[in-house]
Amino acid sequence: MTVLTWSDVRVEQLKKLWEAGLSASQIAAELGNVTRNAVIGKVHRLGLSGRAKSPSSAAPRPRKARPAQHMMRVSRPATRGNTALAHAFEVELEPDPIAYDNVVPMSQRLSLLELNEATCHWPVGDPASAEFFFCGGKALTGLPYCAHHSRIAYQPTGDRRRQQPKTTR
């Protein structure tokens, strides 16, 4: 492998090309036997970072108009006192039997293999224990959880920030 050094002639040629506004790739091609990265490194070592910009490159280019994209907005499930979100899911905010005492009836509890799109996927307990199960309640349309567990899972950002983190010592 041949290592080329920067001769005084090549350095002067680099300076002229840089001041002329050529890119590092263009300079490398003009000089020959040198890479773009070598040109960039030499420019920085020589302190040639400032150079006159052409008026066309100084002005920002107008952005191309993007075609309208279809964005799918997903509403969050209803939280206490927010019926607008409940209407987005077309569900009535009926009292959830497990919302008050957080006890899932035995007949409602499901194993992983019993879950489907219509059942609540909220895990209850330690997955390593034999008593582990999923809620199994009626899931809200388009969501994996029932009304109660959706309120827990999808909290508005402001509500989460107001809650103080629990410190364990």
Image (cartoon, rainbow, N blue to C red):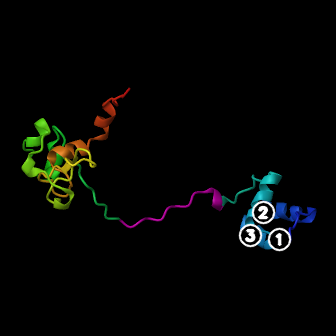
Circle 1 sits on which residue? 31
In magenta stretch: residue 23: no
Residue at 18% over, 56% down: 111
Give the side of residue 165 with respect to residue 100, left or right. right
Please tell me which of labels 2 and 3 falls first in the chain.
Answer: 3
Specify start and end residues of the magenta stretch as a single range.
56-68
Please tell me which of labels 2 and 1 falls first in the chain.
Answer: 1
Instruction: Residue at the far right: name it.
Output: 8
Q: Amino acid at mark 3?
A: Gln
Foreground disc of the pair 2, 3: 2
Circle 1 packing at 10 Å, graded few (<14), some (14-19), many (20+), is some
Residue at 76% over, 68% down: 35
Do we see residue 110 in this rendering?
A: yes
SS of the residue at dot 1? helix
Secondary structure mainly formed by the magenta segment: loop
Q: Position of residue 4 (x, y in %)?
A: 87, 67
